[in-house]
Amino acid sequence: MKKTIICRCEDVTEEDVLQAIDEGFEDIEELRKRLRLGMGPCQGRTCIPLVIRILAKKTGKNVEDIPLPTSRPPIVPVTLEALASDEDEE
Amino acid sequence: MKMKNKADVVIVGGGVNGCSLAYQLAKKGLDVVLLEKKYICSGATGRCGAGIRQQWSTKENTMLAMESVKIFEKLSRELGFDIGLRQGGYLIVVHDKKEMRQAEKNVEMQKTLGLDVSIIDSDEIKEIVPILDVKGMHAIAATFCPTDGHADPFKTTFAYAMAAKKEGATILTHTPVIRVLKEKNAVKGVKTNKGEIKAPVVVNAAGVWSKKVAETAGINLPNQPYRKEIMVTERIKPMFEAMVISFKDGIYFSQQDEGQILGGIPNPHERKGYLTDPTFSFIQHMSKTLLRYAPPLGYLRVIRHWTGFYDVSPDARPIIGEDDKVKGFIHCHGFSGHGFMLSPMVTKLLTEYIADGKTSPFLEWLSLERFKGKTIQKEVSVVG
């Protein structure tokens, strides 16, 4: 069967997303937590816009009515060494 | 669609405790409605450190945790969904003589309850978690219990929620409770943003918002909200299985099932209040302390950092059971950072009480009334 990767960091396919929506996970935050979507190093930059489109199509909602999940720091991955290097802890 | 307007039990809160209760009560044949103001796992459960620990300083917590582990061990099979339980043990660092005395006291008490736990030396520490720098973390020993571990809070909670629905429970997300309805001194139901639901029993499992829910029923809770922060790194190959914690430094960290390192520490510059923003001072302090404990992790990248709340009771132990003034109002909060790990046994006790009227010494020990005029026996084994 043909599979389309939606989230490259966590290996989630379009089929996984559709199945989870069928199981009742219609909230983007719930989908994230059910499938680990957007929890990898790219922070959802690739998958979240795709998932929003799938959700919109499947639930009949408008894309703009589906809120983006909470964004969390850091904006890009940073090494522990770099974060620990600044002596000026405040 | 018209909302259900009555039930046997209304549960406020879609975290692990609420969902577990919904499942167990529905299985007993009760008509259950669970109300969640946001989405399942949106509160403390979905933000927690995932740990499951049985090493406590108080007998009640140790017993609760040991019974909970027995339930966790069978849970994937019972719910038909893998909850990601991994029992790699908890390694609790002992830094000085004072901590050693407490550790010896704890281990002795824990052993009388039948827990497999021991005090280990620095060689044994290195065997269990090879990346640890015993000198860097100022360790003189550690306590270790191999059956402690962690499970996936999302998987566990969703497994409960799905099983609850299968048993006939109704779960309504994005449905905040505006107030608890009372008549004389008994609960009559709840008012939500979508209408009223009549019920003779209302369970308050709203985590850090429990205080506000209780207020609407005229009940004053002594709980306080504490912001806590956690960070997670990118995935790496499996390096260690134990959760490493230190009560002195407040740090805890583990490698999760998928390979990421996840951990937290109290922010040295924490302010009070319902604050939810992650802070830079946390991530700096965490990185510094983590690298002091485990220097080889320096190259590893932090990918995410978030906050959640501890719903802290005066003795850092949960508050469970029926209110002594408002009939039908069931407390299930005050977990003080341990709601996930204690949930199996706590919800089992509450299910037996609500469905069968069965009481237990635990319900007495952990009742809200314990704070009235009695000496508080505080749980001291707390991190994060």
Image (tube, helix red, strand yellow):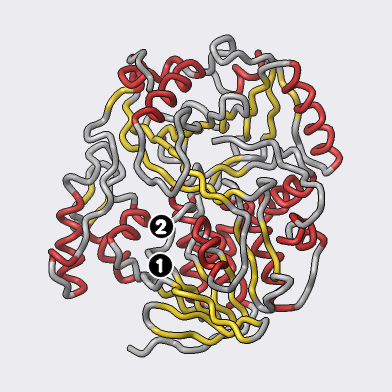
Label 1: chain letter:
B
Number of other residues with Cα within 10 Å of mark 2, as a class: few under 14, some 14 to 19, many 20 or more: some
Q: Residue at x 55, y 51 (%)?
A: B311
Q: Residue B171, percent across and down?
A: 45, 74
Q: Residue at x 49, y 60 (%)?
A: B209
Q: Is residue B257 above or below residue A17?
A: above
Q: Quadrant of residue B51?
A: top right
Q: Give the camera-side residue of B138 and A86.
A: A86
| C-alpha gap between disc 2 and disc 1 | 9 Å
Q: Residue at x 51, y 70 (%)?
A: B12
Q: Earlier in the sequence, mark 2 or mark 1?
A: 1
Q: Is residue B316 above or below residue B35?
A: above
Which-is-in-front pick, marks 2 and 1? 1
Which amino acid type corresponds to the residue marked 2 in the rendered image?
Answer: Ser
Kindly check if marks 2 and 1 are in contact, taking CB atoms under 8 A apart as contact: yes
Q: Is residue A83 above or below residue B72?
A: above
Label 2: chain letter:
B
Q: Residue A12, percent across and down?
A: 27, 51
Describe the element under mark 1 as helix, strand or loop: loop
Q: Residue at x 13, y 70 (%)?
A: A62
Q: Residue B228, percent across and down?
A: 47, 41
* B161 displayed left or right of A66: right
Please give the residue where the numbered disc 2 appears in the rendered image.
Answer: B42
Location of the N terminus of chain B (image quadrant): bottom left
Please give the residue where the numbered disc 1 appears in the rendered image.
Answer: B37
- Number of labels in the image equals 2
Which amino acid type corresponds to the residue marked 1 in the rendered image?
Answer: Lys
Q: Residue A22, percent across and down?
A: 31, 71
